[in-house]
Amino acid sequence: MTEPLTDAALRRLKRSGGRQAATDPSVLALLATVANGYPHARIHWLTESREAILNDWHSKRLLKAGRLAAMIDKASSVGALRKLAASDLQQYANDQRRGELPTRLFKRLDKLLRADPNRFTTMLASAERGSTYWTLTSRPATAIFSERDPELKAHVFAVSLKTLDEDPDAGKQSQFIAAGELERYAFEMLDRSARALTLDQLVRGLVVTYGLDPAFEQPPDENDLGGGFYGSERAGVPTLDPPDVPRDDRSAAAQRLIASLTARQLEVLKKFLEGITNQSEIAAALGCSAATISSETGTLRAVISALAPPEEQPEVLHATANLLYGDGHEL
């Protein structure tokens, strides 16, 4: 019978190296305990077999890129490792649930564009539905959109969509965005860009901006996790090649930043601008979990990265602080 993992044993395993420790029977037994005891309501869309859940989670996620080894290295105690594992299991389940979302968005946008010829029309037809270029009927485009993700993301951020919260307790996969908002998205993307976009590009805009592909971020620090057994939420958007922001246009970038944030994300940004960086402290002030703040922080970083390259982001944040608090606010 495998002995339960203790803090002393964990310290010895950490000294031996995370990769070797990841194969230790006591670590695997801890993972089994987490999988077997995890609330079914939070991962009900996975298979009913807890053994199958454990095997899939272990093979599809924990063994990739030394993820389990990294979790062991980060954990300061068995309790911390258990919290990291529980958070990772929830993220794995969320990613499995979200896997079909891009396909569902493709079908919804395709139906939406074809349903209203007075609003949307084709510019360049293709045998492949995803490759057909669409434009506004009232203002036909004369050029097509490029394939650059940073520019695509910048337009999506400017639309400032109101997305639906991901509800782990829902009986079916979250639709992510309501029908009215999806129609506004299609219209404003074509209107703002003044170019024709393909159905594939419209779907990709949502996928890359809102991180709808399965996430594989680094394990969080244990201090960023909430006290609950399943305090993990979607980590937000990945950052990719931000477009340059002209040096004389910081105020405009700051305005776009503020306009693109939800009310809670704006409150988190204000806390950071006020010099409050402890996520647990911010969570307590806003009445939510530290994991939620960690998620919102990831989204903030992605939004800012889409607006400006790293060397210009402090100036954008300074301009944002001036808009929120008046000129002269010190970061």
Image (cartoon, rainbow, N blue to C red):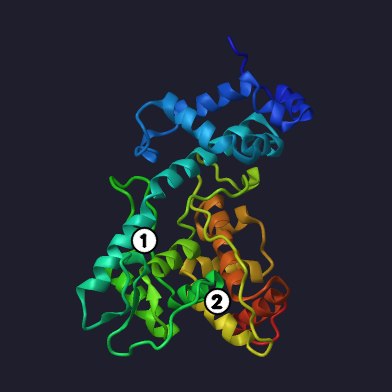
The quadrant holding residue 36 is top left
User: Which quadrant of the figure contains the N terminus?
Assistant: top right
The quadrant holding residue 175 is bottom left
Residue of label 2:
257
Residue 169 position in % (x across, y down): 34, 45
Q: How many marks?
A: 2
Identity of the residue drawn at 32% across and 49% down? 173
Tag 1 or tag 2, which sits nearer the N-term?
Answer: 1
Looking at the image, residue 29 sits to the left or right of residue 210; the answer is right
Asked whether the viewer can see residue 322, the reply is yes
Amino acid beneath label 2: Leu
User: Which quadrant of the figure contains the C terminus?
Assistant: bottom right
Looking at the image, residue 213 sits to the left or right of residue 249; the answer is left
Asked whether the viewer can see residue 178, the reply is no
In this view, the residue farthest toward the front is 127
- Say few, some or many: other residues with alpha carbon within 10 Å of mark 1 (under 14 / 14 to 19 / 20 or more): few
Residue 11 position in % (x across, y down): 75, 27
Q: Quick one: 177 or 195, which is closer to the camera?
A: 195
Identity of the residue drawn at 55% across and 45% down? 226
Residue 164, disc: 1
Amino acid beneath label 1: Leu
Looking at the image, residue 27 sits to the left or right of residue 189; the answer is right
Residue 274 position in % (x across, y down): 66, 70
